[in-house]
């Protein structure tokens, strides 16, 4: 390459002080995120990084990672249907008939008769007038809140709600107030204030039905009573509830017999329904309004036919084989009792989501790796997803786990828990947990 000849002259342009600080780049934050000596740099160098680990083969309750077979105790495949032959055949048949995708939004060219069939089936199953599908569960909640809560309205949101509800609050023009987790007295103070100061404001209470880290249920009876008293709508995100708990797997409200009292319920297909996508159910007028105003519905490509057919097949199995739900509940009770008898803190889990608290973040990463080497895959969860000093292994279970697999999970946790001082012999908390996990 030949450099230009300036004949001894300096090129024209702005003069730069060689000692001046270089201008900031919008990408500086990316460099700082992985800066040498920082948290993530240390975790990577110690080979403790637990995220984005590739699964080479998955057979449901087991998986292969780095050539090693492990028991999958960190999947949301609650009904164990991702590898069910009936489900896979339904997906293949849909590809043969419709192709691989719709190449457009539901609003335009992306509506198949399959989409309409699934919406009708879900509305009937969940005992609501209407249903609308979205391309992901995340987009469901984001679009739903953006559509129904607008300028002048107020969203009352549980502080432990999932990120997709928070995303909906951020894109909505409505005001958001966040009440302490499951603290209905705190919620009442906000409802009273807004009702007094802005009686004309539309109000919606938004909460997870089952909280994804703790495995606990929202206090639906209390929320229904407050919603009725203050004229607020009630919205439940049942991503971890439909196909998991309640009458026939109908979710959190059905646990309490209060389906009719909940105005909007959303869910996802990426868990019990072994697919991808999301839905919302409610009154016909409201759902049609959402269908025409939720940006994540109007401006996103629709669920591909194979995904829709998968959900329909899973729904068929859920309705025909309710014993899967019984087995899932039995497994959840067995594992909670097992962890507690070993001395682990599993918070107040009430579902197949069972957190196992191990304390400080680096210990959690080391604990995760030792579990993996012992043949068990779980999910390491650290702040801000959980409180400081309460990093945990998020375990979750499938109706298809065998008794022997469950016992192997408990055995591995016992071994690793003793090694790290999380538990001690005799089924009591270990020295590492004597300060509530902050040691």
Image: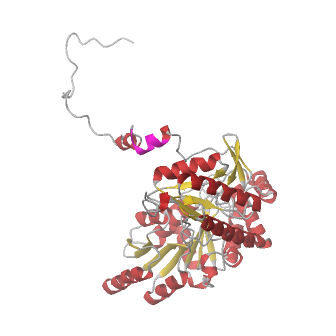
Q: Residue at x 57, y 68 (%)?
A: 215
* Relative height, residue 192 to residue 120 (above, below): below
Q: Nearer the viewer, residue 320 or 143?
A: 320
The main secondary structure of the magenta stretch is helix
Image coordinates of residue 146 in percent, x first then y, are 46, 67
Q: Is residue 207 magenta?
A: no
| Image quadrant in which you'd find residue 402 | bottom right
Q: Nearer the viewer, residue 62 or 337?
A: 337
Q: Quadrant of the C terminus?
A: bottom left
Q: Write the start and end of the magenta stretch as one range.
A: 37-43
124 relative to 386 in the view: left or right: right
Identify the residue at the far front of this view: 426
* Relative height, residue 134 to residue 7 (above, below): below
Is any part of residue 339 visible from this angle? yes
Q: Nearer the viewer, residue 84 or 118?
A: 84
88 relative to 349 in the view: left or right: right
């Amino acid at each position: 390459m030949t450099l230009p000849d300036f004949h001894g002259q300096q090129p024209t342009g702005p003069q730069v002080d060689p000692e001046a600080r270089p201008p900031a780049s919008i990408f500086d934050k990316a460099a700082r995120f992985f800066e040498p000596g920082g948290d993530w740099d240390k975790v990577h160098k110690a080979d403790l990084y637990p995220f984005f680990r590739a699964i080479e083969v998955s057979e449901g309750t087991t998986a292969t990672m780095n050539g090693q077979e492990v028991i999958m105790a960190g999947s949301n495949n609650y009904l164990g249907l991702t590898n069910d032959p009936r489900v896979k055949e339904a997906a293949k048949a849909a590809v043969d008939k419709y192709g691989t995708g719709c190449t457009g939004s539901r609003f335009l060219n992306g509506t198949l008769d399959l989409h309409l069939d699934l919406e009708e089936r879900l509305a009937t199953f969940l005992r609501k007038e209407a249903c609308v599908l979205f391309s992901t569960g995340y987009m469901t909640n984001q679009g739903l809140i953006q559509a129904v809560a607008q300028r002048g309205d107020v969203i009352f949101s549980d502080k432990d709600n999932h990120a997709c509800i928070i995303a909906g609050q951020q894109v909505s023009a409505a005001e958001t107030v966040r009440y302490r987790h499951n603290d209905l007295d705190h919620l009442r103070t906000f409802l009273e204030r807004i009702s007094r100061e802005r009686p004309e404001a539309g109000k919606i209470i938004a909460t997870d039905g089952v909280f994804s880290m703790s495995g606990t249920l929202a206090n639906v009876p209390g929320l229904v009573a407050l919603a009725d008293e203050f004229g607020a709508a009630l919205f439940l995100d049942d991503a971890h509830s439909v196909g998991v708990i309640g009458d026939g797997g109908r979710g959190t409200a059905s646990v309490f017999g209060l389906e009719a009292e909940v105005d909007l319920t959303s869910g996802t297909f990426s868990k019990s329904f072994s697919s991808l996508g999301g839905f919302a159910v409610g009154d016909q007028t409201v759902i049609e309004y959402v269908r025409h105003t939720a940006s994540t519905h109007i401006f996103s490509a629709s669920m591909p036919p194979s995904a829709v057919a998968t959900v329909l097949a899973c729904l068929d199995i859920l309705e025909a084989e309710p014993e899967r739900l019984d087995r899932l509940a039995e497994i959840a009770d067995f594992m909670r009792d097992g962890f507690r008898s070993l001395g682990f803190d599993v918070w107040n889990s009430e579902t197949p989501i069972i957190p196992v608290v191990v304390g400080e973040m680096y210990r959690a990463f080391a604990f995760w790796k030792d579990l993996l080497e012992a043949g068990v895959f779980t999910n390491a969860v650290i702040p801000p997803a959980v409180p400081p000093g309460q990093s945990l292994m998020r375990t979750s279970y499938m109706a298809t786990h065998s008794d022997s697999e469950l016992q192997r999970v408990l055995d591995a946790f016992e071994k690793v828990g003793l090694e790290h001082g999380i538990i001690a012999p005799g089924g009591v908390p270990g020295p590492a947990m004597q300060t509530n996990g902050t040691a």
